[in-house]
Amino acid sequence: MKRLAMVLGLVLLSLGWGLTSARAARVGERAPDFTATDSNGKVHKLSEYAGKYVVLEWTNRGCPYTQKHYNSGNMQRLQKEWTGRGVIWLTVVSSAPGKQGYVTATDENSYVNEVKAAPTAVLLDPTGALGHLYDAKTTPHMYIVNPQGTLIYNGAIDDRATTDVADVNGAKNYVSLALEEAMAGKTISAPATRPYGCSVKYPN
Amino acid sequence: MGFERQFGLLVLAFICTICALALPAAAQASETHAKVELIADPESRVSKGTVWVGLQFSLDPGWHIYWRNSGDSGEPPVVRWTLPAGAKAGPLEWPTPVRLGSGSIVDYGYENEVLLMKPIEIEKGASASSLPIAGDVKYIVCREICIPGKAHVEVEAGTDNALPPAKTAEWAAKFRKAREELPKRLPAGWSCSARPWETGINLRVSGASAVRNAIFFPDEPGVIENSASQKYVASGSGFELRLTKSQQLLHRATKLQGVLVVESLDGTRHSYRVAMPVH
């Protein structure tokens, strides 16, 4: 009887776990809270940003899709514009040690200076815990949380799913569009799009 | 090392660099891990009204390119075709893909080699005995990392002259293999239907027998969760495949379309084109 109870308990637990992680980060639902450390050793919790818009940007500097947005200055422009308008912009690196995009804190800080990136902070997630919590699949993969803590956007940075720098201009930028709409109190026209990029380099 | 020797090596290195830079783009260097060429079906003739060409990708071990729906990451190859006057291109034919990746990121594509065939229709009354076909290809090839690639490729199609016999046999074999790898129509007596449930879609196949497993590849992204396992359940008249809805799917899916690969009891695999409404 005790054994049966234990087995049942385990089954229920794993069912619950499965349901939770499968339903994490759905648009329209509460964005999962997290605790993560940035490249300056500072700890961030999503909940400390209640009352602000938060953008999460998954990145890997070696990925050609990411490079399209950084080499063109597009990502830096977005970061500057939106942090200037009070948005918290958190870049996330979920590459595992030894995999493309993995960085040490010092490395990342040099890189941010070098490319003139302007996020609020860069969260280092080498275990992939934050990535898996949000089910981040590609670099780039973008999420927006509104001041009430609801996830209002999950998907691609724009509508040109290519590695061509020439496709940056003229692309419909889903992040800017969603932020503009949300700030104007309008319905988000494209709340969930298919993210494009290289796969996030999680640990095996 | 003596000065003369050092200088000589330097000159040699310089010459080699110049030579490498001067090589034509069509001879793919191994750093892209893919060799791309345009070949023509040796059986095609202009007089028959349709000639077939094929984009042949030969990939280094472990590297892959993507299917029409790349899955969670990557993108399929894209071609801008240059055709002679009076010729019209039909759609690219995609052989059955394989599932790539693992964990929370699953893609669809091809490893080793694949031929993407394209029919070119010729206007009645065309007098040419052969057609020059060209393509500008953009693709991405990945393993642990991804490398974008570009190639300009050309071939003379529909002609029966001047290919050495070994080449003719090689190209004919590639077209034969690609045709075998295309998904076929469902066997007579089999039918498909799809029914939604809270977090998924049940793909039911009736009339199937002597089958033990199946896997579904969706034509469209954003309908099913690619990384979720597809639970195979035998049912009285066939089987069901329990698919999970994509996180990006905010509205109800109205149709399901793609490739169904079925594993028979004897271990052989068969690939079918399926399309059905979801209700």
Image (cartoon, coloured by chain):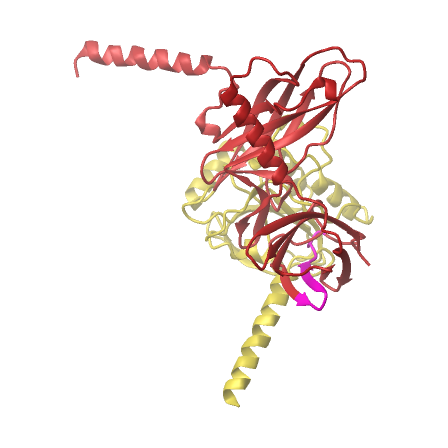
Q: Which chain is yellow?
A: A
Residue A196 image-quadrant placement: top right
Residue B33 sits above or below residue B215 on the image: above
Q: In the image, is residue B119 part of the stretch drawn in magenta?
A: no
Q: In the image, is residue B237 part of the stretch drawn in magenta?
A: yes
Q: Position of residue B92 (x, y in %)?
A: 69, 32
Q: Position of residue A98 (x, y in %)?
A: 40, 45
Q: Position of residue A26 (x, y in %)?
A: 69, 57
A27 relative position to B99: left or right: right
Tell me the quarter of the image containing the C terminus of chain B.
bottom right
Q: Nearer the viewer, residue A140 or B134?
A: B134
Q: Nearer the viewer, residue B104 or A114?
A: B104
* Residue drawn at 67 percent across, 37 percent down: A81
A179 relative position to A94: left or right: right
Residue B214 image-quadrant placement: bottom right
Q: Colour of chain B?
A: red
Report if residue A66 is visible in the image: yes
Q: Position of residue B135 (x, y in %)?
A: 64, 21
Tell me the quarter of the image containing the N terminus of chain B.
top left
* Residue drawn at 65 percent across, 40 percent down: B182
Q: Which residues are magenta?
A: B234-248
